[in-house]
Image: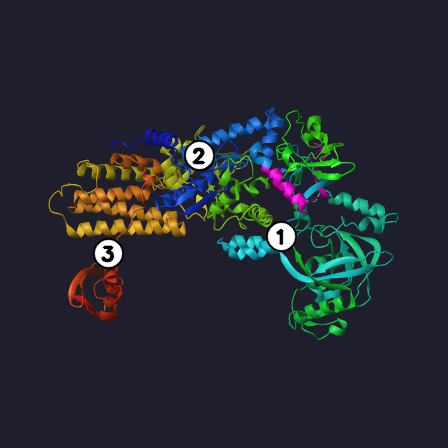
């Protein structure tokens, strides 16, 4: 080993060696229990950020540990490669999205290799390549053929300046992110997947998953199951009945008005040709500049319009006015509500504003609520009042009683409702999977023939950023023949939401090069479900929900044997960093990267000021926040690797915080990790030198004089305690920070006993080897170099994880003789002071004793504390 730890030379050497030997390649037929470990694949933005580094370092430690434990590990990587940034780059810079994306994938692939992540690159996939999106199209067709893909009109975000549809993420504070124009709404025909058909299963099967409870709760809330009743209200002078859903049918007698979402299909027929038609159009014009989040906000001022119609309450025959209002959405429930202002805050605010009746129908029996003089609404259980035949009934019983009565009279029925809505998957964009549907005047919407897949993205498109999808500009793409009748037809020009691409990629990884099928079901059966999935909590709802939906659908169709995608889930916390800024005279803020700022300290080492390195002028500290482009506080992983090395970066990011917690970036802490690696390097180098450079542990090594038994016991305890702690923390808990801490304690002890006492060179050699093995999942490059220096020819990754000796973990141990029928058969090492019964229990658990007593009857076990255990058998 060289005297100096040269991370640049070491990391380059071993990255090249790993690639040349295909060390990380997964063989489906290799021995060992299969373990599928997967991190969420990234969008190829061109540069890793520290969130990526943390995610992939966590996964890599687990993957390396599992391999050393004898598992056959599948650990692949790919690219979620369709998306808006590539198309925006095409519009802005004239770079084709395909070129832009491939360049960025290459750059990020190089960065991941620099980090030493143990991916099987032979399974690499990219969702933008035809060999992948062919099968995304094929899966869509299976949805369509099963009646779960359909098209309907729906309002979308529309920028009148760019003349284009915008995805939600392109709308920033109600305006187009590109031009700043206020965004409105426009009705378009779009494709949906009927995920609501799976709502109950998606909810029920959460109980089977080893996921954080917080994530399960988020999914439960998103699916939003509720029980209640659907009630039909007649509308005077209108043939159809208005159906509403309520979770509190016990409050039906308190209805004083009805509200329709302005987009409700009844609004037109109810107001066309009336004095309210023009007013409705004007009201709708105001709403086009409000998104759904704003409309459902508690702080939104409630606005409505009476549309000149009355509904009839089926329970009491009362006429109640019908309104449209900004706080009711078409996509929730039936798009209409019965308003009970006494017991709902939004209804109460609306009723007060428009002078509508407020009738309490629940008496909670509380001194602080005067139901005859309400100044604010209350939601409570209690006794039903003002409720006709149900007066005096407990409201909890009333829910069922009223529902039963509605069913008896034919006015409604009990119902289960879900907050979840069908999945809108249409995008008026180029850089996405073409939807494989064809429209024929005679046959309507028809799926493309499967043998014609993939439907390729055309190259003869114009990226204007205005008007319809760029696919509209390609006549070669748009014009086709009907798959059923052969007549001239038009292709769908929408592309798919990129969430579809990531909803099945984990299955494709099991069989990434299959050109005949999306995947071989036998390979999916071998590897799926993913044993451990790792990613950001920001994907805890939609991505995970959609992946579960796809998996269950493919299972139902007999295509996949797995009905859940991910058995266990780890959601890592965000990486935070300081922010620094200056504000000019006009209040404009400029943010500066922490790497460009120098901190000035006082005599006590406290930070007194911060200045920009470039000009020496002061900057102001902001909050410590998530690394982001907007605050310019991202730390470049390449710069960190160049300064301290990949191993030091990995060690810092794993040691600084538990994986699920936030991590605050610290350049000084990364330097500390680099120094620790140097300390390990020096310890291992000296252990090797003192052992005479011999290749096999303990083979002919000199003791170096009289050994100190107490010093050796201390070292053995520290070594075995670390082996046990690190194995448990990685393998069972994913507590990497405490595992690293245990290794550090072991290193501290090793340094101490070497200086304070005489320890055999052979024991130091053994301690150094065990240290390398334990540290290798965290800092693989330097550990490979040290392992090779010890004379080992194979990779440290191919070694078995060290096994700890329980006896070495007993402090102040004493040896007790074990006899069978009075004859000495061995000894056990136990803690001092054990009782006779504790000694007896320890002895019969010995494997050697079990072997010697197999087939015999144990008559009794006699323990003599501090001396002997005698086992009597016949």
Q: x, y percentage for residue 127?
A: 56, 35
In front of the other: label 2 or label 3? Answer: 3
Q: Is residue 641 above or below residue 772?
A: above
Decide if residue 260 is in sight here: yes
Residue tagged 1: 198
Q: Which circle marks residue 410 in the picture?
A: none
Q: Is residue 146 magenta?
A: yes
Determine crowd level at label 3: few under 14, some 14-19, many 20+ residues with C-alpha closer than 10 A: some
**Residue at image location 79% in from the left, 64% down from the top:** 313
Q: Is residue 604 magenta?
A: no
Closer to the camera in the image, 634 or 185: 185
**Residue at image location 23% in from the left, 44% down from the top:** 766
The Cα–Cα distance between marks 3 and 1, rounded to whole angstroms, is 54 Å
The Cα–Cα distance between marks 2 and 3, rounded to whole angstroms, is 42 Å
Residue tagged 3: 807
Q: Which residues are magenta?
A: 135-164
């Amino acid at each position: 080993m060289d005297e100096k730890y040269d991370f640049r030379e070491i990391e380059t050497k071993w990255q090249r060696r790993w690639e040349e030997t295909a060390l990380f390649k997964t063989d489906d037929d290799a021995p060992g229990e299969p373990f599928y470990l997967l991190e969420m694949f990234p969008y190829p933005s061109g540069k890793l950020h520290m969130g990526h580094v943390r995610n992939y370092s966590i996964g890599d430690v687990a993957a390396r540990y599992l391999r050393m434990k004898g598992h056959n590990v599948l650990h692949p990587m790919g690219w979620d490669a369709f998306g808006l940034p590539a198309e925006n780059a095409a519009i802005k810079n004239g770079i084709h999205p395909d070129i832009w994306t491939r360049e960025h994938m290459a750059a990020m692939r190089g960065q991941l290799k620099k980090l030493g992540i143990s991916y099987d690159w032979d399974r690499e996939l990219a969702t933008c390549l035809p060999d992948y999106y062919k099968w995304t199209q094929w899966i869509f067709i299976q949805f369509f053929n099963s009646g779960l893909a359909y098209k309907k009109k729906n309002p979308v975000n529309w920028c009148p300046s760019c003349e284009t549809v915008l995805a939600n993420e392109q709308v920033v504070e109600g305006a187009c992110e590109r031009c700043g124009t206020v965004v409105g709404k426009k009705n378009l025909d779009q494709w949906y997947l009927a995920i609501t058909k799976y709502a109950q299963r998606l909810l029920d099967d959460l109980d089977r998953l080893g996921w954080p409870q917080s994530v399960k709760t988020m999914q439960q809330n998103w699916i939003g199951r509720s029980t209640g009743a659907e009630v039909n209200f007649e509308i005077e002078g209108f043939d159809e009945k208005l159906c509403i859903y309520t979770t509190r049918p016990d409050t039906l007698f308190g209805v004083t008005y009805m509200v329709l979402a302005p987009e409700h299909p009844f609004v037109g027929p109810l107001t066309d040709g009336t004095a309210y038609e023009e007013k409705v159009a004007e009201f709708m014009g105001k709403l086009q500049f409000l998104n759904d989040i704003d409309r459902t906000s508690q702080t939104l001022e409630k606005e409505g319009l009476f549309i000149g119609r009355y509904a009839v309450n089926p329970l009491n025959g009362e006429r109640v006015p019908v309104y449209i209002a900004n706080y009711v959405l078409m996509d929730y429930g039936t798009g209409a509500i019965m308003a009970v202002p006494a017991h709902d805050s939004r209804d109460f605010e609306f009723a007060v504003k428009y002078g509508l009746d407020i009738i309490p129908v629940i008496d909670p029996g509380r001194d602080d609520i005067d139901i005859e003089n309400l100044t604010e609404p209350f939601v409570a259980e209690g006794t039903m009042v003002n409720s006709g035949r149900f007066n005096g009934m407990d409201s909890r019983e009333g829910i069922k009683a009223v529902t039963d009565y509605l069913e008896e009279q034919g006015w409604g029925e009990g119902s289960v409702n879900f907050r979840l809505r069908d999945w809108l998957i249409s995008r008026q964009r180029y850089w996405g999977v073409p939807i494989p549907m064809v429209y024929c005047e005679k046959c309507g919407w028809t799926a493309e023939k499967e043998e014609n897949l993939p439907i390729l993205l055309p190259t003869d498109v114009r990226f204007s950023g205005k008007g319809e999808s760029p696919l509209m500009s390609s006549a070669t793409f748009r014009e086709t023949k009907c798959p059923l009748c052969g007549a001239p037809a038009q292709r769908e020009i929408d592309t798919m939401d990129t969430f579809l691409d990531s909803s099945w990629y984990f299955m494709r990884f099991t069989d990434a090069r299959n050109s005949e099928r999306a995947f071989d079901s036998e390979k999916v059966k071998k590897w799926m479900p993913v044993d451990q999935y790792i990613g950001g909590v920001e994907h805890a709802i939609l991505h995970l929900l959609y992946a579960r939906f796809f998996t269950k659908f493919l299972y139902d169709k007999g295509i996949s044997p797995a009905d859940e995608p991910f058995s266990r889930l780890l959601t890592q916390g965000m990486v935070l960093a300081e922010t620094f800024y200056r504000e000019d005279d006009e209040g404009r803020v400029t943010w500066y990267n922490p790497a460009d700022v120098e901190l000035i300290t006082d005599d006590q080492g406290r930070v007194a000021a911060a200045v920009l390195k470039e000009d020496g002028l002061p900057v102001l500290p902001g909050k410590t926040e998530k690394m982001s482009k907007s605050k310019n506080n991202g730390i470049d992983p390449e710069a960190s690797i160049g300064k301290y090395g990949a191993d030091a970066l990995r060690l810092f990011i794993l040691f600084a915080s538990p994986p699920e917690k936030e991590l605050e970036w610290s350049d000084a802490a990364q330097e500390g990790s680099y120094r620790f690696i140097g300390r390990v390097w020096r310890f291992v180098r000296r252990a090797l030198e003192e052992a005479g450079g011999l290749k096999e542990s303990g083979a002919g090594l000199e003791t170096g004089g009289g050994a100190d038994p107490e010093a050796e016991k201390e070292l053995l305890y520290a070594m075995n305690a670390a082996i046990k702690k690190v194995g448990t923390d990685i393998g069972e808990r994913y507590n990497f920070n405490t595992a690293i801490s245990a290794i550090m304690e072991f290193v501290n002890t090793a340094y101490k006993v070497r200086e304070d006492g005489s320890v055999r060179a052979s024991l130091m050699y053994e301690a150094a080897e065990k240290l390398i093995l334990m540290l290798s999942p965290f800092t693989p490059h330097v550990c490979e170099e040290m392992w090779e220096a010890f004379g080992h020819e194979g990779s440290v990754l191919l070694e078995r994880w060290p096994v700890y000796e329980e006896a070495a973990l007993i402090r102040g141990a004493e040896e007790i003789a074990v006899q069978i029928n009075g004859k000495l058969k061995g000894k056990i090492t136990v803690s001092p002071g054990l009782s006779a019964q504790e000694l007896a229990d320890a002895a019969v658990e010995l494997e050697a004793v079990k072997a010697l007593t197999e087939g015999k009857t144990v008559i009794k076990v006699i323990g003599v504390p501090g001396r002997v255990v005698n086992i009597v058998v016949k």
